[in-house]
Structures are given as structure tokens and as C-alpha cells.
Image (cartoon, rainbow, N blue to C red):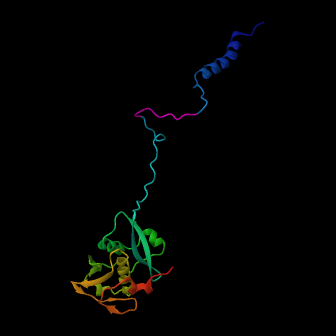
Amino acid sequence: MSAPLGSRRAAALPLLLAAVVAGCGVPAEETAREVEPPDGVTHAWATPTPPDPTPSIGAVPARLYLLRDGELVAVTRHVDAAPSVDELVDNLLAGPTDAEQRDGLTSALLGNDIVVGVQLSDGRATVELTDTLDETGRSDQILAFAQIVCTLAAKPGVTAVSFTRAGQPVGVPRADGSLSEAPATAADYASLVSDR
């Protein structure tokens, strides 16, 4: 006796489905290949993620003098072009960067708006000071002037630094505490420079 027609159909159905599914597949290849999405179709998974922007680092070294534990520390920053004497002092007055602060660097010039401008003539940088210099009440003026002199003297072509107020020479403290209107050099503050 033969099986009823319904049970033969039920037994054949899985075989028929397996044949249909197998026939609808993508043919296999021996090696994988990358498939580009059609023009005009974009998906988050198909769009490359741009790299995080990194701060640009210039090719020109600029040396500034900051402070750590009451001593001058030479710091090299890389900029796009050689800074002018004005730009060097502006960078110095802006204080240490976040990374420099994390490294323990500070400045005696923070909060001081003592410089009007800087001129360079025949190797001498002349720093014009504001009238408020005597009113700062800072006890670290020696370090502040040391930062300015050493930073400017580190620039090629600068041999000495003079300070003026309203065009008249101003006496500034040297490392030994003496005041002088004579042009200052980095040697005047050498005892304050860290050897670490």
C-alpha cells in the first residue's frame, strides 16, 4: 500500500525548499574581493572615518625660557616661521602651554602686561615697558626679566637686550640683585638657568 498523498507532499516539501534556497545563493569564489558601493550610495559603514586632527608642528624651533622650581628652563616650541622679537615676547607673555604646565613649568610674567613692544636694531633688542611696571608688586621681577632677556638672546642675531620706558633707559634687576640700565645678556642670568 502506498503512503497517502498528503504525507508524500509533506516529506517532499523540505527537499524542495532546500533545492530552491541552494539555487538562490551567490556562487562561491576562491578568494575574497572588495565590493565598492554603487555611485551615489553612502552608508556609515562604507564611509572611511577621517583621522583625528593633530596639532600641526612647525619646522622652525623657537626657544623660550620658562620657570620650574624658581629656575629658568629652556623650552623649544616648533613654529611655522621664525618668530620676530615681538612674537617671541608675546609667546612668552602668554605663558606655558597646557602640556608645559603638566610638565611643571610656570612663568613669572603671567598676569603682567608690562611690555608695550620690542624693536631689534644692530643686534640689540629694545623692550619698551609700560608705566605699570613699578606697580606690579611682584617679588619675582628678577625671574621675569631673566625670562625676557634669555628668550630674546636665544634668537639668532640678538646679542643684548635693553629696556626703556617712554623711550628712556630703565634699570632692571640682574641675577645678583643689582640694577643696571646697561644692555643685558643671557650671561647676566646664567646662575638662574637650570642645569637639569
State the image quarter where residue 64 is shown: bottom left
- Taking the spot 21% from the left edge, 83% from the top edge, the residue there is 167
Q: Is residue 155 above or below residue 191?
A: above
- Taking the spot 49% from the left edge, 81% from the top edge, the residue there is 195
Front position in the image: 78 or 20: 78
Relative to residue 76, is residue 24 drawn left or right?
right
Front position in the image: 92 or 110: 92
| Helix, strand or loop for the magenta stretch, by majority | loop
**Is residue 36 found inside the magenta-colored segment of the image?**
yes
Find residue 129 and report its horizontal and vertical position in percent.
Answer: 27, 82
Find residue 118 and report its horizontal and vertical position in percent.
Answer: 27, 76
Part of the protein shown in magenta? 32-40
Relative to residue 163, is residue 100 drawn left or right?
right
Q: Quadrant of the N terminus?
A: top right
Q: Is residue 131 visible?
A: no
- Taking the spot 38% from the left edge, 83% from the top edge, the residue there is 186
Q: Is residue 172 visible?
A: yes
Q: Is residue 189 above or below residue 40?
A: below
